[in-house]
Image: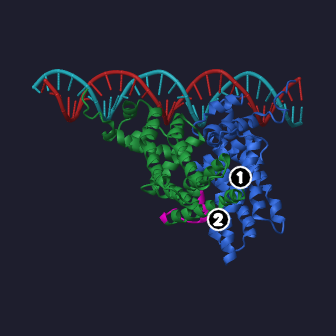
Chain colours: A green, B blue, C cyan, D red
Amino acid sequence: MNHTKRDANHDPTRERILDEAERLFADQGYAAVTVRQITQAAQTNVAAVNYHFGGKQNLYLEVFRQRWLPRARRIRARLEPLEEREHCTPEEVIRAIAEALFLGFSDQEERVRHSMLIMREVTKPSAAFEVVASEAVRPFLGLVRRLLGKCLPEVDEQRLSLYCLSIFFQVLHFNFARNMVAKAMNRDYDQDFLRLLVDHMTDFSVHGLDGARAREREA
Amino acid sequence: MNHTKRDANHDPTRERILDEAERLFADQGYAAVTVRQITQAAQTNVAAVNYHFGGKQNLYLEVFRQRWLPRARRIRARLEPLEEREHCTPEEVIRAIAEALFLGFSDQEERVRHSMLIMREVTKPSAAFEVVASEAVRPFLGLVRRLLGKCLPEVDEQRLSLYCLSIFFQVLHFNFARNMVAKAMNRDYDQDFLRLLVDHMTDFSVHGLDGARAREREA
DNA sequence: GTTTGTTCGATACATTTGTTTGAAAAACTT
DNA sequence: AAGTTTTTCAAACAAATGTATCGAACAAAC
């Protein structure tokens, strides 16, 4: 009855399991991770997963609900100030997106973990996909769309969506394919490189929109 | 005599296993697929995988060697005519890339399968990654770089690499995240939509390069 | 101190996993 | 047609997997 430790958010074991589970799931994917790996990393017993989460599958979902989604909301919140402004340029919007998704994490490891989990869900949707799509991806893309739409009022719906996707995909991809990028660029993925990526992304995408703006001027 | 199996050259057990294995691995990932699923789909015995390939891991590698790589080479071959031409515009290069990666497959299912396999290797590199990277990705990016470099002779190395990656990532992503795209665009991923994507990709990326061209003119 | 509810951990359990085996069947060679 | 090699299959194997059980440890309430 009493909420002694029932405030699940402060149960150390539960928290440790969530942390390690997120790390391992991001790193290896759902099927490749075993409950024993998780509990061993969290320095507890095999049964702990079933006790606290009722099974492996539910633990996976809980990772998204309690770890991934809050972070996604935090990232999105960085873009909301732009929405209140009366006017902003495409460059400002795109740079804000790039900065949010490249630099909006507390460290590199968190950024990679976050990107990996979403990429895995896109690659092989599970029950978590619905949650992620409706609670994070759709609102985020919607926000981006509104922001861009405000700058480019004459661009038609479909084209606008494509621009949003092109921008979003580039950032996502530069985040998650960092091994390939590091190899292709022959560079470390350090903070400086991330800043370079923000600049590149912004430059490339702002000009990418020029087609739309030219079309707009004609109309 | 009843040689229903041996004489049909496209029906030998080995080929069927490779086909079904590729389909399943692309669909679910290495760890999530069981040998029994594969052999059942290929209408043969569990032992067949070990007899023909020496194990699950090696079958996975063989899928890349015998199915994925040849297809990747075929795709790349579509770009090679451009290299022989004395001069070509960025638009021609980018459109050729988009067309190769969007329309260069015999059907939609093959395109999706192909994209999924590479994305999975990027997400979680296995022994196959080295093969894919050195035999397909590196040569492809190298070719794209040479083609773009020919059009934009004054752009520095690093920037050129970033442009190549931005272009490559967009196509890859539009290919593999088709569920998300279809949902965001509220459209089917049919042939018409692919052609629309080619146009968008080309338009967006050609303008994306304008920053580089402007910088080039200044120099 | 006793009770009561919660957390934890060693162990057990039933499945499922990839792989092996040995013999039958088929295909090929002579 | 007989002999040899290659291929297929059912069954078995050990290891690993997710989950369930049950009692000990613990903390708070009485």
Q: State the image coordinates of residue A165 (x, y, percent, origin top left).
A: 62, 49
Q: Look at discs 1 and 2 and give the one toward the viewer.
A: 1
- In x, y percent, where is residue B39? 67, 31
Whether residue A126 is situated above or below residue A88 in the rendered picture: above
Please report, as a chain letter, where disc 2 is located.
B
- Looking at the image, which residue sits at the far bottom? B219
**Residue indicated by mark 1:** B200
Residue type at numbered disc 1: His
Residue A195 got which mark? none
* Image quadrant occupied by the C terminus of chain A: bottom right
Q: Position of residue A125 (x, y in %)?
A: 57, 37
Q: Is residue B118 visible?
A: no
Q: Magenta stretch: residue A136 in it?
A: no
Compare marks 1 and 2 and give the one earlier in the sequence: 2
**Which span is picked out in magenta?**
A180-191
Q: Is residue A72 visible?
A: yes
User: Which of the image's four quarters has the N terminus of chain A?
Assistant: top left
Residue at the image position 48 percent from the left and 64 percent from the top: A191
Assess whether residue A188 is covered by the magenta stretch. yes
Q: Is residue A124 left or right of residue B5?
A: left
Classify B101 as above or below C19: below
- Type of residue at label 2? Ser
Query: Is residue A100 left or right of C27 when viewed as pictured?
Result: left
Q: Secondary structure at mark 2?
A: helix
Q: Is residue B38 left or right of residue A23?
A: right
The answer to which quarter of the image holds residue B143 is bottom right
Chain to which the residue tagged by mark 1 belongs: B
For the residue pair B126 and B72, the one nearer the viewer reads as B72
Determine the image quadrant of residue B194. Answer: top right
Q: Between residues D13 and A73, which one lies in front from this camera angle? A: A73
Q: Position of residue A126 (x, y in %)?
A: 55, 35
Which residue is tagged 2? B161
